Amino acid sequence: MLEAALSLMRLDILLPWILAMVLGVFIGAMPGLTATMGVALIVPLTFHMQPIAGLAMILGLSFTAIFAGDIPATFLRVPGTPASGAAVLDGYEMSKKGKGSLAIMIDLFCSTLGGLIGVILLITVSPTLAKFALKFTHFEYFWLGVLGLSMSAVITKESNVKGLISISGGLLISTIGIDPSTGFPRFTFNNLNLMGGINFIPVMIGLFGISEVLRAISSQSQDQLSGAAVLQRGRVKILDVFKVMGRNKRVIAQSSLIGTIIGALPGAGADIAAWVSYGVAKKTSKKPEAFGTGSEEGVVAPTTANNAALGGTWIPALVFGIPGDTITAIVLGAMLMYGLKPGPLVFQDNKILINQIFSVALISQVFLLILGFLGIKAFTWVFKFPKNVVLAGITIFSLVGAYAIRMNSFDVFMVVLFGIIGFFMEKVKVPLAPFILGLVLGPMIEDNLRIGLIKSDGRILPFLTRPISATFALILLALFLYEPAVLLVKKLRTKKAA
Amino acid sequence: MKRILVLALAIMAIVSIPLAAQAKYPNKPITIVCPWSSGGGTDRTARYVAEALSKELGVPVNVVNKTGGSGVIGHSEVLTAAPDGYTIVNVTFELSTFKYLGYANITPSMLIPLFQFNEDAAALSVKADSPYKNVKDLMDAIKAKPAGTFLFSGSTIASAWDLPRIKLLLAAGISPKSVKYIPTQGGAAPAITELLGGHVDVVTCSYPEIASQVDAGTVRTLATFSEERNPMFPQIPTLKEQGYNVVGGTWRGFALPLKTPDHIVKFLEDAFKKITDTKEFRDFMAKNQFGIKVRNSKDFSAFLDSEFAALEKVMDEAGYLKK
């Protein structure tokens, strides 16, 4: 392993690797540009390099991009990548209280630590986790989706009814487009763009980002942007960051684990990992009421999990030669161009390469810490500008980013439309996050339920009898019955006492 | 003096407009529309061709990925783009299915097929520990067991990997409805994952996509849906050898909007021919394990017409045909 790490210390590997990671910071921080797009962008450049240099660029870029997506999420409420959706919740609340710098530093260290734990799990237990991941099929993914969706009840600060309204909106939008199990176009009105479905990234940018811009414009006060408080509060003490992390050891550990496992599942990725670990952190917290108001745990959980998931996505790729997410899918394709045949044998036969990959993944975490820090510094420079300039900038970058997703102006209109919808939703205090969750998880739940039912001839039983399905079902039952049960017991006791 | 200068400039400007318009094609960047996402197989070929075409023509050639709607969004560009030769659409097998599925009114007669450069036959694979050693074993088992016992997968509904399966079942005298099809999103990889997990019984996809699993001893490929054995993997028998007269799979090519002038079509056709004749092209295709099948505009057009006509029955039998 050490030998493999030393073999990387060459200029023709280090230079493209670090440059790719710098690019990753930029791509992650730009709304609309995702880590997957960044990887697809650099892959053609890597074809003329030696394989490990190309793989180092891809790995490095994905780690910095997933972290950097949290930077605009924390300061501006614009998630830079889909995986940063959950990082908005408490990160931005901390920013509003002028603790944005602390939040993003916690985020950086948690991302690094989560990434590190994910990679260590990849190195140590990947065969076991990969076999576990293979057990997942439509029945299990259905429950994972439901579990994720139930988190919307957890993340709703306001009334449950409003949470339900929001989530139903997201679920409804998610049904637009070609139905994958029958091929039937739904709610498309013969419009080609609707045929493609509503992409959730423009919706997310609109709901969170543009609606906040609209709010800032419409508010009477001449206050600065919340993120601008960063500059006034001065430096963050690293010691404070470590204290926060020390207090949240358990959350970091559980989020890393959840992140890696969900990442290892071919049917779920960093975004779902972040939402689920946020929900689990809140459910297991001693101070659940603090979530959504700028809680430390609320920052720690999703940001640890999304980077941990990256290590996880490589698990099925390295063990079975099957992609764990869209990034590893591109990697497996690119490996052909490197003259490597991606599959279960390539890594068994190629101990040097796999050790090099592990070394790259580990060393990338160190680079992430440094480049992430510089990225934050560069980003806070934004706040030197007056509010009106920053707001215009956010709007332009959001629109351009949305267009870049698939060069379709329809997506730009979606950003504007959902920006306006988000603005009014907040006016009537309907939470935004459940809407996103409904949109992301709707297809996962629906497709897996329906295809699962095709498999089982319409019988519900396999959803309950398969071991992992049953475990998920029981966890859900426990989640929902816990609070009523506690209430009931209390009531009975008071009755007895009386 | 000044007046004369202005006049001279004005005359030059007026004269140069028609000159510019008549300037030799191509004189500005060309766009290749790829209906599939960046980083995937079709995108890789599109980017390779774009680079080669740019070298050949001396103008930049950019690939734009217009994805979504099972490929219908990108393919529809061929109906709406200006017929000036500056927009070339990278078309794939799915083109022939959109009308039957009711996604969009696109038929081969609504575009100019420019050039085909690839063809990949489907292959039929089962898990290595399954009892089926050849296609007949499998077909007999499907006939013998109650309907719905066997689960097939490969890709999305009515895709290049789904339809060959239907053709095979029909050829074997089995109703397509007596097996179940598990649609997956995002190429063959999720279907292979399902097969490895033991959640489906049979997967149809190209052999290169599943070859590494065969090499690792986890999967057995029973047959390819090609006319004859592929020289890249001659050990895999064809369906024809095993008594089933079925071929099927996917292809990739390029198309132009309908009213593109003939001389531009000819010009691009020649350029593509030059590219596909090079050793670099063959090396690239071999490295990526894509099969080479070159058809010029005329042959590609005839091929598309016959495929499109033949698909109607298959789609109908499969229950996908939207009437």
Image (spheres, grey):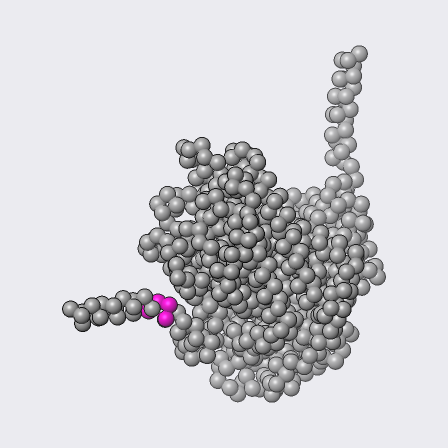
Q: Residue at x 65, y 43 (%)?
A: B82
Say whether residue B176 is left or right of residue A219.
right
Q: Residue at x 62, y 50 (%)?
A: A373
Residue B52 visible somewhere in the drawing:
yes
Quadrant into which the N terminus of chain B falls: top right
Specify the segment rendered in magenta. Answer: A477-481
Residue B161 visible somewhere in the drawing:
no
Asked if residue A480 is among those painted magenta in the image, a careful observer would answer yes
Relative image position of residue A346 (x, y in whole percent): 72, 73
Q: Name the chief secondary structure element in magenta.
A: helix
Residue furthest to the left: A498
Asked if residue A412 is among those painted magenta in the image, a careful observer would answer no
- Compared to residue A189, the image places residue B187 above or below, namely below
- Compared to residue A132, the image places residue A48 above or below, namely above
Relative image position of residue B30 (x, y in whole percent): 72, 46
Q: Residue at x 64, y 80 (%)?
A: B218
- Compared to residue A378, the image places residue A86 above or below, namely below
- Compared to residue A379, the image places residue B11 above or below, namely above
Residue furthest to the front: A239
